[in-house]
């Protein structure tokens, strides 16, 4: 019996170790190649660097205009996530508390929109908004992210708000609060766990997204970090060593954010499961 338990524990450990190596391998490959020369990256990508040379990082920061691209990514991510959170929370509150055929139809339309793949919308999206002159703007990109992110956020808020007792709102009304005050001071604070979860998931999505910014942001001045990283891959040549350094620089802010918020996302998922 003890032997069987030991074999089972060893098998579990080896499986977890294999999964860890599988997930960490791409990141380790990027990191070790960011210190090599371009020739060494191409000829021997799996070897460790002979020395830790930071010239690739200095060159990457200069060529990709790192701090300008970092500012663009921060602007787009913060504004987009704020739009998604505020709009979806208010819309879900309306759909839950004002039951009608119209609210049911809106909810069904939002759910149906989530199954449409973005790739099928790319050509009409670029054609229509291009003719209207609504491309090449960071603010319009925030608006597009809000449009694509609101359906899922509304759906998740909708399920959470249904579990909030109406008595809490009625007590606030008795105290003289308006409908907006009830939402801001009573309902929205209760939504903190699901709001944190949605904010983290949306930040990870928007910060790392390449496809939508590549369709919308046409000028170099508006480039976000993923677009700036693509600068190192040309039609006839690619500077892999500097590209690896640029990827590491792009990854560091979002990893720090995730590590700082990791406890909150686990708590948010657990609270949502209990609800």
Image (spheres, grey):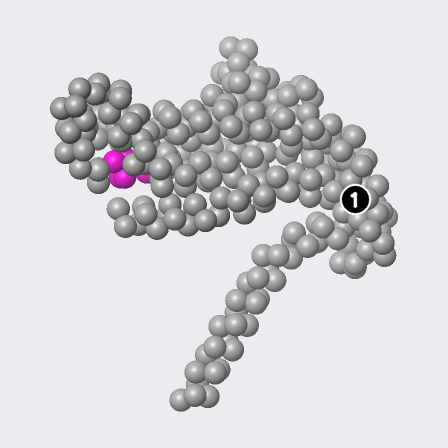
The x, y position of residue 203, in whole percent, is 50, 36
- Residue occupying the point 72% across, 50% down: 31
Residue in the picture at 51% in, 18% down = 140
- Viewer-proximal residue, 97 or 110? 97
How many numbered badges does the structure rendering display? 1
Quadrant of image for the N terminus: bottom left
Identify the element where label 1 is drawn. helix
- Which residue is at a point 79% across and 58% down the rendered structure image? 48
Which residue is depicted at the point 61% across and 39% down? 253
| Image spot of residue 82 (x, y percent) | 44, 27
Q: Position of residue 125 (x, y in %)?
A: 49, 22
Task: Please state which of residues 196 and 97 is positioned toward the viewer in this rendering.
Answer: 196
Q: Quadrant of residue 136?
A: top right
Residue 260 visible in the current orientation = yes
Q: Which of the 4 image quarters holds residue 104?
A: top left
> Can residue 110 be seen here?
no
The magenta stretch is 156-161
């Amino acid at each position: 019996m003890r032997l069987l338990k030991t074999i089972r524990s060893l098998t579990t450990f080896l499986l977890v170790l294999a999964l860890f190596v599988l997930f960490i391998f791409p990141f380790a490959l990027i990191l070790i190649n960011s210190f090599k020369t371009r020739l060494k990256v191409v000829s021997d990508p799996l070897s460790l660097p002979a020395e830790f040379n930071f010239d690739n990082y200095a060159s990457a920061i200069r060529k990709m205009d790192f701090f300008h691209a970092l500012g663009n990514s921060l602007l787009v991510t913060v504004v987009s996530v704020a739009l998604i959170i505020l709009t979806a929370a208010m819309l879900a509150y309306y759909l839950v508390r004002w039951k009608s055929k119209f609210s049911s139809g809106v909810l069904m339309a939002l759910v149906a929109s989530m199954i449409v793949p973005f790739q099928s919308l790319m050509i009409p999206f670029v054609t229509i908004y291009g003719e209207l002159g609504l491309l090449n703007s960071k603010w319009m990109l925030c608006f597009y992210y809000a449009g694509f992110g609101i359906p899922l956020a509304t759906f998740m808020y909708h399920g959470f708000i249904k579990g909030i007792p109406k008595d809490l709102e009625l007590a606030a009304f008795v105290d003289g609060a308006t409908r907006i005050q009830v939402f801001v001071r009573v309902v929205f604070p209760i939504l903190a766990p699901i709001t944190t979860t949605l904010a983290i998931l949306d930040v990870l999505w928007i910060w790392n997204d390449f496809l939508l910014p590549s369709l919308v942001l046409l000028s170099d001045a508006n480039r976000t970090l993923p677009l700036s990283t693509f600068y190192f891959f040309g039609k006839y040549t690619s500077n892999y060593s500097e590209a690896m350094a640029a990827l590491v620089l792009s990854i560091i802010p979002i990893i720090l954010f995730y590590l700082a918020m990791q406890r909150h996302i686990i708590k948010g998922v657990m609270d949502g499961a209990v609800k």
